[in-house]
Amino acid sequence: MKKSVVIGALTAAGLSAGAAAASTLEDVKARGSLNCGVSTGLVGFSSPDANGTWQGFDVAVCRAVAAAVLGDPNAVEFVATTGKTRFTALASGEIDMLARNTTWTLSRDVDLKFTFVGVNYYDGQGFMVPKELNVSSAKELDGATVCIQTGTTTELNLADFFRANNINYEPVPVETNAEAQQQYLAGACDVYTTDASGLAATRAAFEAPDAHVLLPEIISKEPLGPLVRHGDDEWGDVVRWTLNALISAEELGVSSANVASLSESANPETPEINRMLGTEGNLGEMLGLNADWAAKAIGAVGNYGEIFAKNIGEETPVGLARGLNGQWEDGGLLYAPPFR
Amino acid sequence: MTTLSDPPQGSFRLSMLIYDTRYRSLTFQAIAAILLALAIWYLGSNLIQNLRVQGLDIAYDFLVDPAGYDINQTLIEYDSQSAHWRAAIVGILNTLLVAFLACVTATVFGVFAGVLRLSNNWLVRKLMSFYVEIFRNIPVLIWILIIFFIMIAVMPAPRAFRGDEPDATMLLGLFAFTNRGVYIPAPVWGPGSLVVVATFVASIIGIFAYRRYATKLLYDTGRLLPTGWPSLVILIVPTLLVFFIMGRPIGLDVPELGGFNFRGGIQVGAPLIALWFALSIYTGAFIAENVRAGIQAVSRGQTEAAAALGLRPGRVMKLVVLPQALRVIIPPLISQYLNITKNSSLAIAVGYADITATLGGITLNQTGRAIECVLLLMLFYLTISLTISAVMNVYNNSVKLKER
């Protein structure tokens, strides 16, 4: 069947090759909803709340894209994926994008054929241990049993770290964060290691969060970001610039509170805000979206700072400081390219 | 119609391929075979072409790259710098280990439960039906998870053994039962231990020789020698004597709490125990039914005749019923062994590093070579299943009714 499609495409190649396959953007618009892959449950990043509505930092990215493309932040089908199933789900087209604290690495980008559209959280791998073990450094973990989510970069970092420091450990591979939490709390492993943000989120869900400490060592760079399939650049651009709009909005002082009034009419003093919110120029049209795409996204979930504060900020149980994830002006790494 | 009454003709004509009933079926079979081959070829080339279009060329180069991950239970030398193929071998050995252990214990459980299900004792009979019905009617994955989570929740963590007044203590000072697994003493082979082992092997051969002699004596003279306690004596006494004569060359490496975990001894991990036990009790329930069916297939007259000859019930079972029942039991037993081997791939649920977890899990994930890994997995399970079938068929041929 695919063969005849190929032959048909060859005959039509002279006319318009690009129009042969429907793009993800068109698929999403035709379907009227966005299929977004998230983690199976990590408090603060993506987990269903008491009403069954998905909430969290990664979930907000999905909702922002849905708002930009479809105008409705609730037009999202959330697909829960594990560390193992996430790439297959994306490659097979089951989901349109993956926002599941996934580390941007060369092999995933090049060999697995995905496009990472940006970084929404700069993270690093850390260790959590019960306070009663009196461990103050990861280098004291010789002989410890370590719970580790299988199929992740953390698994490889862990092996590298212990080998580089010439100490031994015993890995306990688990599938999901929930399973790791259960084994860690039961004492089946001494240490739980994953991205430091994930550890903070997991600890926030414990009955006694104070009885556990995060060790100071951060043993890897884990830039986490949303990703899409390789080869559909139009769709990649939509997700990339939605994320950039959220980041720029914070930098430019656009928030969910003032976005409605700012996008009513063009203000000659703030040309970049005008271009982003579509009151000036045709950036939305270039992306194949409505002029108010960014205004819809920001209005739905707020700017990057609001999303951070609401889901994982210091006021929340997860309690993460901005740190590396501040705006570049504040000494962080967030630096969105200009809207021009 | 006419072909039936026509006398057979000497020469073969092409039209006979269609009109002659002797050849017609062959013609159609040939056509069907060609069509089938064409269809398979089309699907196969379509698959290969589509894979190539997607940029997925099948290549096994990744197998020699360093795996980069660690495995908690390995039977051979392995570290994170070993190649992916070595991780696969570790997985294969772990699969074979749990499959072998589970086959043995499932057979023991199955034979016990199957025989006792036919007991005259009402309570024993009902208990065994209860066992069979409960265990075979709940999916094995659930059993694996239940046993694993109970182990983790109920057994003490190694840190409970610490302190002057620990919450948990080691059994006899030798065995430690923790929620990470069971630690047992490991033998330490000193100089001269080879002699002890050789004596032990020789004693086992001696037992067989003694039993053969006893049987021969029974058939020749009708004199019945006891076999139970002499076997035990032959097994233990010479080995013990040599052990002390050689100056106790075999020591014990007793596990000790050090750092975070017990060190020394042999660790039997909680995932292995959960998987082994779950597969055993689950498949044991099926084997029990096979055994019961086999025993009931032996006609009652055999039992009664044996009893009439004065054999005691235990001997009736051992000498008359079971040998005949085995003919019925063995063929379905083969499929149960295959089921155990294939069900062991559920190991991933509890983090046991079998072949599905290493090659089909972590390697697949880290390299993204899904098709290659899954093809290898299929090849492995197919090979091992066919091997088990072949071995069991040889055994089946040796116990089946010899027609003379």
Image (cartoon, coloured by chain):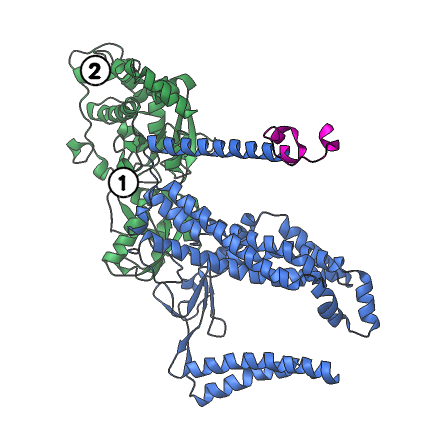
Chain colours: A green, B blue
Could you tell me residue A166's position as x and y percent?
Answer: 25, 61
The numbered mark at residue B120 is: none
Which residue is denoted by mark 2 in the rendering?
A275
Q: Mark 1 or mark 2, which is nearer to you?
A: 1
Query: Label 1 marks which chain's residue?
Result: A
Left or right relative to B9: residue A157? left
Mark 2, secondary structure of its residue: helix
Quadrant containing the C terminus of chain A in the rendered view:
top left
Task: Name the residue carrying label 1.
Answer: A107
Q: Secondary structure at mark 1?
A: helix
In this orientation, does residue A16 appear?
Answer: yes
Outermost residue toward the right?
B308
Q: Amino acid at mark 2?
A: Arg
Q: Is residue B73 above or below residue B243?
A: above
Q: Nearer the viewer, residue B39 or A75?
A: B39
Badge 2 crowding class, 10 Å Cα cut-off, few under 14, some 14 to 19, many 20 or more, is many
Q: CA distance from mark 1 to mark 2?
A: 36 Å
Residue at 39% over, 21% down: A5
Q: Position of residue B364 (x, y in %)?
A: 37, 45
Name the residue nearer the viewer: A282 or A190: A282
Region of the chain picked out in magenta, as a range: B1-24
Q: How many numbered discs, if any? A: 2
Q: Could you say where residue A317 lies in the image, as x and y percent from the top left?
A: 35, 40
